[in-house]
Each structure stands twice: as C-alpha cells, then as structure tokens.
C-alpha cells in the first residue's frame, strides 16, 4: 500500500465507497477530529497508568477507528447494489456505550464527591485527559452538524457524548491514582 497517491493534491479526498469531496467537507471534519481524538487517547495510554485503564483505552481506540469508518461512509454508499453492507465491520452500538458507562461507574465509585468545577492540570497524564475531552467535545459538535445534514447512526452521537464523560472521570481517577490534587475552580471575588 503506497502512502502517497496524489489523488488529494487538488483538495479533495475519497469517502468510503469512492465519493470524492472537498477536504473541508463536514464529514471529513468530523472523522478527522475523531482521528485527532484517537491520537490524544494514545498519548494518555502511553503514560504510567494502570494496565486496566490502558486496556480500556485500547478498546476505545479501536472503537474510534470503527466510528471514523462509519462517519467516512455516506448513507448512499452504506450498502452495495446487492443489498450487502459495504462496511462489513462491527458497528458502534449500545454495547459500546454500555462499556463506557460501566467504566465510568467503576472509576466514579473510588472518587470523592465533586464539590467544584475542576481546572485541567496537576499532572501530564491528567492534562492529556482534559485535552482529549475537549477534542472529543469538538468531534461531537462537528458530528451533530453532520447529523443535521444527513442522518447518522444515533449510537455515534451517544458514544461521543459518553466518551467525553469517560475522559473527564478518567482525569479525576488519574489524579487520585497519581496522588495529585485536583485543582478546584473557585471564582475570585472582585
């Protein structure tokens, strides 16, 4: 497989199924941001964190690749003329969302009750979680725009929403595990 094809030199790229679109197309923006998110999750996974969290993050990275493939497939190209699915991979579904919810609940059970908003920081691993959370929220916003244009599988939006919650709770869990203080946001009185 050659890395450069030269087919994108004019500012277009191919979606799954062959349709060519501009590189700033909302579909490209959405799955490109999911790819960016996946890279940040790789940064988190590369930190000195528990094997259980690394395993969960690897599963999430694989699911984000699937989600990106789903976003890269326009509705009119989802099935072949024979009626067979073009994208023959397991899709993001309610089980994917339930996995995130279970992981959130497990981590949340160990955490002190939140009494304030929390500022990002305290440790590099925690900061990477907050950056990933922000990128996840951007991916979600871009996917909502795309969904308004052409209906997407509803599990995609749910998954991205839940994943940003997961990343927030993971930041709190890593603060606890790494024995760093959470930085509470306390507005100054002027």
Image (cartoon, rainbow, N blue to C red):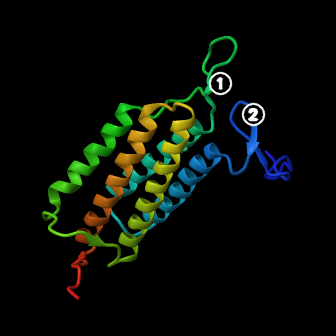
The residue drawn where x is 49% and y is 60% is 42
| Residue neighbourhood size for the residue with mark 2, other residues' Cα within 10 Å, grouped as few (<14), some (14–19), many (≥20) | few
The residue drawn where x is 43% and y is 32% is 154
Q: Which residue is mark 2?
A: 19
Chain-order first, disc 1 or disc 2: 2
Label 2 element class: loop
Position of the N terminus by quadrant: top right
**Left or right: 35 in relation to 53:** right
Separation (CA) of disc 1 from disc 2 = 10 Å
Tell me the quarter of the picture where residue 16 sits.
Answer: top right
Residue extending farthest to the bottom is 190
| Figure check: 146 above or below 122 | above
Q: Which residue is mark 1?
A: 76
Q: Are marks 1 and 2 in contact (CB under 8 Å)?
A: yes
**Left or right: 150 in relation to 120:** right
Residue extending farthest to the top is 82
Q: Position of residue 189 (x, y in %)?
A: 20, 85
| Residue neighbourhood size for the residue with mark 1, other residues' Cα within 10 Å, grouped as few (<14), some (14–19), many (≥20) | few
Label 1 element class: helix
Q: Position of residue 120 (x, y in %)?
A: 35, 73
**Left or right: 53 in relation to 109:** right
| Figure check: 190 above or below 151 | below
Q: Position of residue 182 (x, y in %)?
A: 24, 75
The residue drawn where x is 23% and y is 88% is 190
């Amino acid at each position: 497989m050659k890395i450069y094809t030269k087919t994108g030199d004019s500012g277009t790229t191919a979606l799954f199924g062959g349709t060519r679109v501009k590189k700033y197309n909302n579909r490209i923006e959405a799955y490109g941001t999911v790819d960016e998110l996946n890279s940040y999750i790789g940064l988190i996974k590369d930190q000195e964190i528990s094997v259980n969290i690394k395993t969960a993050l690897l599963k999430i990275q694989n699911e984000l690749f699937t989600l990106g493939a789903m976003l890269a497939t326009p509705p009119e190209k989802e099935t072949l003329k024979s009626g067979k699915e073009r994208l023959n991979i397991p899709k993001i579904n309610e089980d994917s969302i339930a996995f995130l919810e279970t992981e959130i609940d497990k981590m949340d059970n160990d955490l002190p009750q939140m009494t304030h908003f929390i500022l990002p920081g305290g440790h590099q691993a925690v900061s990477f979680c907050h950056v990933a959370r922000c990128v996840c929220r951007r991916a979600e916003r871009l996917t909502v725009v795309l969904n308004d244009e052409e209906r997407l599988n509803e599990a995609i939006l749910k998954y991205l929403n839940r994943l940003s919650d997961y990343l927030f709770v993971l930041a709190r869990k890593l603060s606890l595990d790494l024995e760093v203080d959470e930085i509470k946001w306390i507005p100054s009185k002027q």
